[in-house]
Image (tube, rainbow, N blue to C red):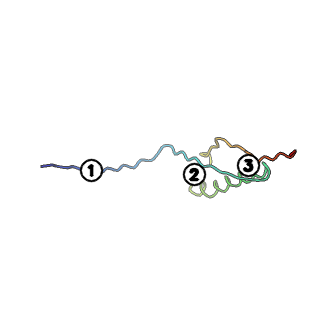
Amino acid sequence: MEIFVEGVSRKNVAPDLVIANIFFNAKGKTSEEAMQRGVNNVSTFTNLVVLGVGLPIESLTTKNFSINEDRVYNEDD
């Protein structure tokens, strides 16, 4: 004779810290245009999502940003 015992357990806990990595990409013909579009993307996200769910804006941090050329043309050729 075999006896099987099976159980399921569930426990929900509130986290002390949640880390969400969010990336924004913006393109423009100039670095100023790309930067402005990026700022607008972050501002829209902050207003709609972060403030919309009641998170404190102080809880957001920016780790880094970079501006890269998509295409480089040599005007001498």
Element carrying mark 2: loop
Residue at left offset 86%, top offset 46%: 77
Residue nearest the observer in this picture, 23 or 47: 23
Q: Mark 1, mark 3: which one is toward the viewer?
A: 3
Whichever of callouts 1 and 2 sits on the residue coming sooner in the sequence is 1
In the picture as drawn, the residue positioned furthest to the left comes out as 1
Percent x, y for residue 33? Answer: 78, 52
Q: Which residue is mark 2?
A: 55
68 sits left or right of 10 in the view: right
- Crowd tier of the residue under label 2, counting other residues whose Cα lies within 10 Å: few below 14, some 14–19, many 20 or above: few
12 sits left or right of 49 in the view: left
Q: CA distance from mark 2 to mark 3?
A: 35 Å
Residue nearest the observer in this picture, 5 or 69: 69
Whichever of callouts 1 and 3 sits on the residue coming sooner in the sequence is 1
Element carrying mark 3: loop
Dots 1, 2 in contact, CB < 8 A: no
Three-letter amino acid code at disc 2?
Leu
Q: Mark 2, mark 3: which one is toward the viewer?
A: 3
Residue at left offset 57%, top offset 54%: 54
Q: Which residue is mark 1?
A: 7
Whichever of callouts 2 and 3 sits on the residue coming sooner in the sequence is 2
42 sits left or right of 15 in the view: right
Tag shown at residue 67? none
Residue at left offset 75%, top offset 51%: 34
Residue at left offset 24%, top offset 50%: 6
Q: CA distance from mark 1 to mark 3?
A: 56 Å
User: Number of marks in the image?
Assistant: 3
Tag shown at residue 70? 3
Three-letter amino acid code at disc 1?
Gly
- Crowd tier of the residue under label 1, counting other residues whose Cα lies within 10 Å: few below 14, some 14–19, many 20 or above: few
Percent x, y for residue 20? Answer: 55, 47
